[in-house]
Image: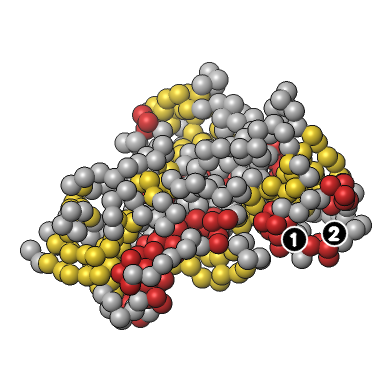
Amino acid sequence: MSEINTTYLIVGGGIAGVTCVETLAILHPEKTLVLVTASTLVKNVSNVTFFAKTIVNFDVNETEATSLQKIHPNLKIIYDSLKHLDTEKQKALTDKGVHIQYDVICICTGGIPRLISDSKNSKRVLGIRDTESVKDFQQKLKTGRRMVIVGNGGIASEIVHATSGIEKVWVIRDDYISATFIDPGAAEFFQETFKNENERKNQNTILRRHIYSEEDSLVSLNKNLKSAALGPDWYRKLENIKSDRGVQELEIVYKAEVESVLEDNKNEYPLRVQLTNSQLVECDFLISATGVEPSVNFTWDKVPEKGQDGGLAVNEFQETSIKNVFAAGDVASAAWEHAPHWFQLRLWTQARQMAGMAAKAMHGRITNQEVLQDFCFELFTHCTKLFGYRVILLGKYNGQGLGTDYEILLRTTPNVEYIKFVLKDGKLQGAILIGETDLEEMCENLILDQIDLSPFGDDILNPDIHIDDYFD
């Protein structure tokens, strides 16, 4: 039974854990750091591009954990899982019996897919979460004839877009596609791409304003959004995987969920999926892409406070209710008072932001330096791709938390762009930018500065007026 002493202890080899290691390598390379990870492969970030101060796009890659030792000379990697945490004695115990004495610790154990309850033992029900599950999906895709996709976030949307040569039944509980990220108007914009994938020609731009009232039910206010946290370009691994059997076909089943899953290998299709709308779908396999749950698979001497979503509640410095115990990424629940235009959504983007903040706060604790919360928590931002288009989400892009007293301004060019502004009292509160709009920096400034746009009226999005010249 071995014992290790370290200043910093990081648990988890996902994007949050690796970001913590990388940040501490810059801030405090002379101090010892231990990374506990169950896999020899860890995730890191590359090709970081800033569209504005807070809008970042990047690629997520897998690399050997040992590569981190090149950037941190005092890093020790333990390939193991955390078994017990004694926060009073500041000592961690791994499954293999390694004792680690630490000064500060950051829990970055991520999340686990929220699988359909009665199907967890079926090998034909997949939760797309990491590289291994993507590989498993690739193999099933080669021989599959029909699959069912359950979920309405980024993972489900990209599976639908990136796969071909197999029948697809997309089951969503909402009344429009990709509801985690977008509104019904953007959903309609994307659905047109299904019909016109190869016909993205210049068409007339449509501009319209909508004022929301209490009777309005067009936009679903997604206040408690969660999303599985694969990298933004993970689906590229699927684009060249096609089935030799079956035909390309997509059926979308709205306002339905899975009631039960029965596996019977005697039938033509081995999986029978019963939906809540009484529809029975037979298929070869099912993809469960309904989000993640915080993963804490170890015991404590005392359990810290948890958020409503079951994650470890953290303050603005990513510290839990137990001193010197920090948490970042999907396992953490943002329990501080949020800035007016920020909210938590479990994505790679926020895992990276939280981990960077945790590393700075841990360093501040060790060096007795004052730390301020990072500026990135002033504005919710997310950059991704959906159905082949660049998508940038800013602030309260779906009117989250604004009640019914706000306006929507839309500009859309079929197969080219979709722009949505959310305004309250004449000030921009959020935006959805789909396509190459070049409006990212302007929107960021307008939301952060809360400039009154009332004098401009609908001309804010008039394509004949270069309004961004006024605000960049």
Along the viewing direction, whichever of 44 and 462 lies nearer the viewer = 462
Secondary structure found at label 2: loop
Residue shown at 21%/45% (left/top)? 302
Front one among 331 and 384: 331
Q: Secondary structure at mark 1?
A: helix
How far across and how far down the image is residue 450, in percent?
Answer: 71, 53
* Sequence order check, earlier mark of 2 and 1: 1
What residue do we see at 61% from left, 37% from top?
A: 401
Please name the residue that numbered disc 1 is placed on: 442
Q: Which residue is mark 2?
A: 467
Pointer 2 and pointer 1: residues touching (CB < 8 Å)? yes
Question: Residue 434 — which label?
Answer: none
The image shows residue 22, relative to residue 254, as above or below, that is: below
Q: In the displayed orientation, state which residue is furthest to the right.
A: 464
3D distance between C-alphas at marks 2 and 1: 9 Å
Give residue 251's position: percent from left, percent from top.
Answer: 63, 34
Left or right of residue 122: residue 379? right
Classify the position of the N terminus by image quarter: bottom left
Horizontal relation, residue 279 to residue 434: left or right = left
Looking at the rendered structure, the kind of residue marked 2 is Ile
Crowd tier of the residue under label 1, counting other residues whose Cα lies within 10 Å: few below 14, some 14–19, many 20 or above? some
User: Hey, what amino acid is under mark 1?
Assistant: Met
